[in-house]
Amino acid sequence: MKNEDSLKRLKIVEGHLHGVVRMMEADAYCIDVIRQIQAIQAALNKVSAAILENHLDSCVITAIRGQDPSERERVLKEITDVFVAATKV
Amino acid sequence: MKNEDSLKRLKIVEGHLHGVVRMMEADAYCIDVIRQIQAIQAALNKVSAAILENHLDSCVITAIRGQDPSERERVLKEITDVFVAATKV
Amino acid sequence: MKNEDSLKRLKIVEGHLHGVVRMMEADAYCIDVIRQIQAIQAALNKVSAAILENHLDSCVITAIRGQDPSERERVLKEITDVFVAATKV
Amino acid sequence: MKNEDSLKRLKIVEGHLHGVVRMMEADAYCIDVIRQIQAIQAALNKVSAAILENHLDSCVITAIRGQDPSERERVLKEITDVFVAATKV
């Protein structure tokens, strides 16, 4: 459900990115291109956050309540991993 | 010249992003989608850096050597601005 | 336990930051100062990730297994929030 | 001149970081500690940006107007480098 919203947003980002490709083809000013790329990255951050929120509300709850400790560990480890990666991009 | 290379890379990112849209349509695992989005952001960082490098080697040098102090100021201000924005995405 | 390790690392960052203050007092080269600040930020990212990992392994598991749905929601919301903030610094 | 302001700000960050060390020693809530660390990183971003601005207004202008092409190249390369690093922390 919520991910349908994320999919919609991601398609909007796709359109935005295509616009930046065209800007570059039209030889737009460098700084303007960089600013648009940064706007795309900010939009992608929002999509990632929405997907994570959805994931926490579903898979993570299921795993933590489940009987499989290795599955639980895996799911929690993944969250730390995407957090670490998030601080690097 | 160098920006043609950036354009090519940006088109590759476009293809990558389209792949992620399809992943989401196919109901891929949330964490895998987030990881792909983070990979796209890392690729966008590289494109931005390449565009900035090109910009410094051309427009910035021209502006700084030019006779117009307000133009020089503007160009330098823009670099600080994209740096500030870069630390926020 | 694990947080004692994080505390130790944070104290090392404190020493590092004090070194950068001294560099600036000694009028060090701007770019070298910026690089040291970036190294400090990378170290802080690692401390945050270690604290989050510890938090997921303790409080989050307790909240999700607990009987209080609003507490569970609060705890999951916090994780999305720090993730969102992480993508902005 | 402007860097004196940066030095002052960096000392404030130092005080802030010391406060976070004490929070951890007092066994503060994990998420609160992470939030304070993120606030410190945001403050460090501002210090870096101010130092870069100062650097562009002085050394970079001098180098670009100077007669030494390798020095000019070096200075411009450094800016791209800190920009690349900024997108990773």
Image: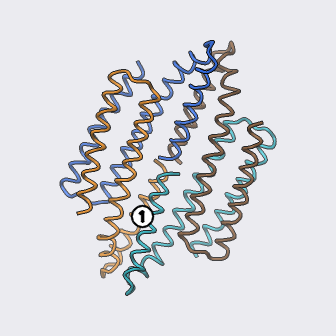
Chain colours: A cyan, B brown, C orange, D blue
Numbered disc total: 1
The residue most toward the front is: D70
Nearer to us in this view, B10 or B25 = B10
Residue drawn where x is 45% and y is 63% of the image: A81
Label 1: few (<14), some (14–19) or many (≥20) C-alpha neighbours in 10 Å: many
In the image, is residue C59 above or below residue A47?
A: below
Q: Where does residue C75 sit, x and y in percent of width and height?
A: 36, 68
In the image, is residue A88 above or below residue A61?
A: above
Q: Is residue B15 left or right of residue A65?
A: right
Nearer to us in this view, D22 or B68 = D22
Q: Where does residue B19 sit, x and y in percent of width and height?
A: 69, 66
In the image, is residue D79 above or below residue A70?
A: above
Within the image, what quadrant is residue B59 found in? top right
In the image, is residue B41 above or below residue D58?
A: below
Q: Where does residue C6 sit, x and y in percent of width and height?
A: 28, 55
Q: Is residue A12 left or right of residue D81?
A: right
Residue drawn where x is 60% and y is 63% of the image: B36
Residue drawn where x is 44% and y is 30% of the image: C32
Nearer to us in this view, A74 or D70 = D70
Quadrant occupied by the N terminus of chain C: bottom left
Within the image, what quadrant is residue A24 found in? top right
Q: Where does residue A85 sit, x and y in percent of width and height?
A: 49, 57
